[in-house]
Amino acid sequence: MNDVPPPGLDLGRLRAHLDRELPGLVRGPLEARMCEGGRSNLTYAVSDTGAPPGAGRWVVRRPPLGHVLATAHDMRREYRVISALHPTPVPVPRTLLLCEDESVTGAPFYVMEFVEGTPYRTAEQLVPLGPERTRAAVLALVDTLVDLHAVDPAAVGLGDFGRPDGFLDRQLRRFGKQLDASRSRDLPGIDELHAALGAALPRSPAPTVVHGDYRLDNVLLDGDDRIRAVLDWEMSTLGDPLTDLGLLVMYSVRLDVPGSPVSTAAGAPGHPDPAELVERYARRSGRDASAIAWYTAFAWFKLAVILEGIHYRYTLGSTVGRGFDRIGDLVPLFIRHGLTTLKEG
């Protein structure tokens, strides 16, 4: 790892805090690197140089540097849902501690175990697996989503994790406000898409724990293509489970954008098409997915807003990582796909 700690993480203060809260956990000096992939909250892989090989490795999550939207980067909620789901069939890392003292790293953060695995973000990464393994991995992603939506929130202590009543309407208003908070340029069609979604709200099924950002590169696959951990729970809540399915369908549409900083896994040979994913989810979960076009259009809108927020932070110089210079170019494309999906089904 690099001797220079990445931005947003003071290793000396982190070590002192771990020694106070979890005495004996760390044996030697800490090293850290920033993990690629996260476009919002920052993720660091931290290792104990005094630990035996294969031990002493953790992950630290904290909000982005600089411009932070209210409620969008709540470490307590993310820590809570991962901790609650650990005993269930949903694979998540084991959590170690939550720190809300901003003097340690400059923001609240939490620490969880390091899980070995690969987050497949691009079609090129999936090619060595071959069509059959790629297909099986994506179908397993659907099955894990069904497992998540089968969890009884009250039984795992998440009965008050969200407000399911009026969920879709509230989501639309929330992302509308996030869009307004990050507006710095003209985005033709985005207000039309927002209004059209609001005029055609479907009736939600019974609420479940919702991941909010469910896709292939937010899970870790081991060498046998099994899902070892579902990551990035920052947008999780109680709500309409079909929003997760709509997002998964959206990410299964091939975009053919060279050098895209957003997942291109849908272009890999063997990747199932959206219709098969919807059919498998509906069959295994028993839910009616006939309104999936609305949920997919909503996913296009939501991602357009999120990407615009990241673009805005990039223009302010308040975020770090590769690929941020190209994110702004994707927003108009997502808006167009959202409008087309909603109009054509």
Image: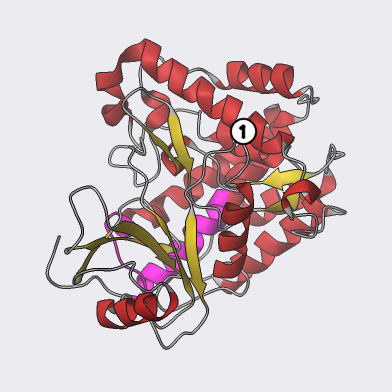
- Image color mode: secondary structure
Mark 1 packing: few (<14 Cα in 10 Å), some, or many (20+)? Answer: many
Instruction: Quadrant for residue 223, please give it.
Output: top left
Nearer to the camera, 204 or 283: 283
Quarter of the picture containing the C terminus is top right
The stretch in magenta equals 303-324
Write the residue at 60% across / 51% down.
302
Q: Position of residue 174 (x, y in %)?
A: 70, 63
**Residue 96 x %, y %:** 47, 62
Label 1 residue SS: helix
Q: Indicate the quadrant containing the N terminus: top left, top right, bottom left or bottom right.
A: bottom left
Q: Residue at x 67, y 56 (%)?
A: 191
Looking at the rendered structure, the kind of residue marked 1 is Leu
Residue 196 seen by the camera: no
Residue tagged by mark 1?
145
Does the magenta-highlighted stretch encompass residue 134? no
Magenta segment main secondary structure: helix
- Residue at x 61%, y 44% (from the top left corner): 87
Between residues 170 and 229, which one lies in front from this camera angle?
Answer: 229
From the top left corner, tell me how far across and down residue 39 is, in percent: 41, 57
The residue lying furthest to the bottom in this view is: 103
Q: Quadrant of residue 203?
A: top right
